[in-house]
Amino acid sequence: MSEAAAAPSAGISRRKLAIGAGVVGALGGLALGLWRARGDAESPEVAAFWAMNFQSPQGQALPMSAFKGKPLLLNFWATWCPPCIEEFPLLDAFYKQNQPNGWQVLGLAIDQPSAVRSFLGKQPVTFPIGLAGLEGTDLSRGLGNMAGGLPFTVVFGADGSARHRRMGRVSPDDLKAWAQIK
């Protein structure tokens, strides 16, 4: 067979191979996205979260297991993050309004303890705050925050499963929709 005669079939094989690789890549990406977005109470990342302990700015222990059993809005924030600070009054109002319905809100500060204490002295909130430090960035990534940005919110159902994730400021519409979760 001449080189010219072999070229078309080689081109078709390369084309089919490229299309096949593209399809496999797309399916792999879809599967990874679905895996990360699933509400799986038993995923390693979620299970690890429920086993963690943090300290409050006042030095009290905050075991995450104490929050399991009721819906929880978990918000990763920092004092140097303007959108984090802007959403704090909204999160506090959500907590006050929905706490009688079993809702919990927890802010995990990815910041220096002294900066958090100083900030909360000027702008207190009624929901608990935990000191996650820089390790909180790794935790937020494990819970679906692939960019590592702030603010980042995870909503857990009463069964402990991660139901929603939100990168960026939460909106009143987000909170209204999440308030329906049990």
Image (cartoon, helix red, strand yellow):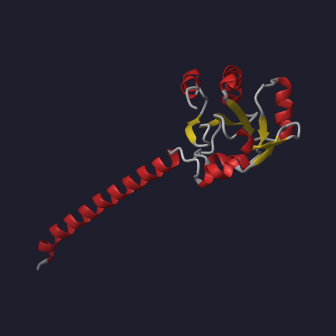
Question: Is 62 placed left or right of 30 in the picture?
Answer: right
Q: Would residue 81 be seen by someone viewing this image from the given angle?
A: no
For the point 50% across and 45% down, the residue is: 38
129 is higher (above) or lower (below) than 27: above
Using the image as rendered, state which of residue 123 and residue 5 is in the foreground: 123
Q: Measured from the top left, where is residue 74 in percent x and y?
A: 67, 36
Residue situated furthest bottom in the rendering: 1
143 is higher (above) or lower (below) than 3: above
The N terminus sits in image quarter: bottom left
Q: Quadrant of residue 18?
A: bottom left
Q: Measured from the top left, where is residue 90 in percent x and y?
A: 67, 22
Question: Is 155 placed left or right of 123 in the picture?
Answer: left
Q: Measured from the top left, where is residue 160 in percent x and y?
A: 62, 42
Question: Is 25 placed left or right of 46 in the picture?
Answer: left
Q: Quadrant of residue 22?
A: bottom left
For the point 67% across and 52% down, the residue is: 48
Q: Would residue 20 be seen by someone viewing this image from the given angle?
A: yes
Q: Measured from the top left, where is residue 164 in percent x and y?
A: 55, 37
Using the image as rendered, state which of residue 109 and residue 40 is in the foreground: 40
134 is higher (above) or lower (below) than 86: below
Give the number of marks. Answer: 0
Using the image as rendered, state which of residue 64 and residue 23 is in the foreground: 64
The C terminus sits in image quarter: top right
For the point 41% across and 56% down, the residue is: 28
